Image: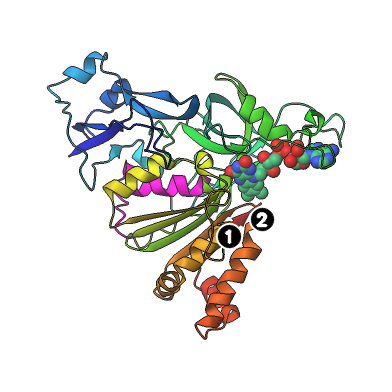
């Protein structure tokens, strides 16, 4: 079996304004036989283009001798094919547990992990900043996709002098194997919480969010106290590998879905071969605010039968009534299909800011009424069948 990875030397997916050029090649090396080649040949680089920092991606280090010939491996440049081969992961024992790990580390005895990298994920025109934070837990704080870590920022809790800060939760944005595919890291997708004085409109640094700013300002090698993992509601049900998963995210709510999608489409896990449909709806302010767009666009190219990806850009697109395009407007656009999929047993997930839910629920309710159905009954059935998963904050 072969694995393939794309290399984007000039930038990510072509954006709407056509600002970015994309050059993509794929390389192929055998899977599962020699993980050292994986580690030594591929290394993370930060992409920088048009003055925009993007997430690190795995790039091919052709200067590495392993890339040329190690035990006779051939690395060939080829055109990216549909159903692209996947990346080998380890240790596969991470598949063995029957139940997810829960609260291995508690606030009184957190695990001290190390920051691997912090990268700005959004472009210059995005309102606010979102960072991709990779944390090395040394394999000591395993988790499943859809769980969260707690982070205890350094310093004293101003409300309880002499005590540490309260734990802040962050959805984990990687699979259990982490972005380095070796089960030693977890990634978080963190929005920097800033405070703007409502009267002057000016930023007031004394009221900036403690933990998000700590994480977004962290440097490689910094220590970070983590707790968890926690949460069961957003676990990816894997009993049926052909199931449909409809994912609705706003902003950093994308985190758990990035983990799901890497598991479905990027990683080679012998015991989980996804053959169903994953449909992602992502709502953000504008195209510069899109998160992990390169990854998702690649799945769209490689797995067109298994992946759908719709974005709602509230400050760039209009809904059919001429108002701002929110994620619920996209849901409405596809409501017939969504309702049909739910009737057939699809799972639906919501993650992001609390404020997203009322608008979405109103839309779903309106659609149900138009279809002559009772939303209350439908919702209670979805909950009863464990098809309905919500994590908002
Ligand atoms: P805090 O210091 O806790 O401040 C909270 C807010 O109050 C900030 O906006 C701050 O600017 C404002 N503030 C501070 N002082 C004042 C003041 N005097 N007056 C008025 N306002 C003030 N967040 C993510 O970014 N990504 C995730 O994936 C994520 N996942 C989550 C998952 C779960 C299950 C939950 C519950 C939450 C999640 N969060 C996530 C939110 C996260 O836990 C934090 O709440 C968030 O990062 C803000 O924490 P902070 O320490 O930066 O801000």
Say what secondary structure mark 2 lies in.
Answer: loop
Name which residue lies at 59% across and 60% down: 323
Of labels 1 and 2, earlier in sequence is 2
Q: Residue furthest front?
A: 322
Image quadrant of ligand 1 equals top right
Q: Is residue 53 above or below residue 331?
A: above
Looking at the picture, tell me which residue is in the foreground, 12 or 180.
Answer: 12
- Measured from the top left, where is residue 299 in percent x and y? 33, 46
Q: Is residue 66 magenta?
A: no
Q: Is residue 347 above or below residue 376?
A: above
Q: Residue furthest bottom?
A: 372
Question: How many neighbours does mark 2 have within 10 angstroms: few (below 14), some (14-19), or many (20 or more)?
Answer: few
Q: Is residue 31 above or below residue 46?
A: below
Q: Is residue 268 magenta?
A: yes
Name which residue lies at 56% across and 66% down: 321
Badges 1 and 2: C-beta atoms under 8 Å apart? no
For label 1, the residue is 390
Question: Comparing marks 1 and 2, which lies closer to the viewer?
Answer: 2
- Measured from the top left, where is residue 96 in percent x and y? 38, 47
Picture quarter containing residue 289? top right
For label 2, the residue is 354
Picture quarter containing residue 78? top left
Q: Which residues are magenta?
A: 255-276
Question: How has the structure been colored for display?
Answer: rainbow
**Can residue 344 be seen?**
yes
Image quarter hosting the N terminus: top left
Say what secondary structure mark 1 lies in.
Answer: strand
Relative placement, left or right, of 221 versus 309 is right
Name which residue lies at 57% across and 78% down: 375
**Can residue 109 be seen?**
no
């Amino acid at each position: 079996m072969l694995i393939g990875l794309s290399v984007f030397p000039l930038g990510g997916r072509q954006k709407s304004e056509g600002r970015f050029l994309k050059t993509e090649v794929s390389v192929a090396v055998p899977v599962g036989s020699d993980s050292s080649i994986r580690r030594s040949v591929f290394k993370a680089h930060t992409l920088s283009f048009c003055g925009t920092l993007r997430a690190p991606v795995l790039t091919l280090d052709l200067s590495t001798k392993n890339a040329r010939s190690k035990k006779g491996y051939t690395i060939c440049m080829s055109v990216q094919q549909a159903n692209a081969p996947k990346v080998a992961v380890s240790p596969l024992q991470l598949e063995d547990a029957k139940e997810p790990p829960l609260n291995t580390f508690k606030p009184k005895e957190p695990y001290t992990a190390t920051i691997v990298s912090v990268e700005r994920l959004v472009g210059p025109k995005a309102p606010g900043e979102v960072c991709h934070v990779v944390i090395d837990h040394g394999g000591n704080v395993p988790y499943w996709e859809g769980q969260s870590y707690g982070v205890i920022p350094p310093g004293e809790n101003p409300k309880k002098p002499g005590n540490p800060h309260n734990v802040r939760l962050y959805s984990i944005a990687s699979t259990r194997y982490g972005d380095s595919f070796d089960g030693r890291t977890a990634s978080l997708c963190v929005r920097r919480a800033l405070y703007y004085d409502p009267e002057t409109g000016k930023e007031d640094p004394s009221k900036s969010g403690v933990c998000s700013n700590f994480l977004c300002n962290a440097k490689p090698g910094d220590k970070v106290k983590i707790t968890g993992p926690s949460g069961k509601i957003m676990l990816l049900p894997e009993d049926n590998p052909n199931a449909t998963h409809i994912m609705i995210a706003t902003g950093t709510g994308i985190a758990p879905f990035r983990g799901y999608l890497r598991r479905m489409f990027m990683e080679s896990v012998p015991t989980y071969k996804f053959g169903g449909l994953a449909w992602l709806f992502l709502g953000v302010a504008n195209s510069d605010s899109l998160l992990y767009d390169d990854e998702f666009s690649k799945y769209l190219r490689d797995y067109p039968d298994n992946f759908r990806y719709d974005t709602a850009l509230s400050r760039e697109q209009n809904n059919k009534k001429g108002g701002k395009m929110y994620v619920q407007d996209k849901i409405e656009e596809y409501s017939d299909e969504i309702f049909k999929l739910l009737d057939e047993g699809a799972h639906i997930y919501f993650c992001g800011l609390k404020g997203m839910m009322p608008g979405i629920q109103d839309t779903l309710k309106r659609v149900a009424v138009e279809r002559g159905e009772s939303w209350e009954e439908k919702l209670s059935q979805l909950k009863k069948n464990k098809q309905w998963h919500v994590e908002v904050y």
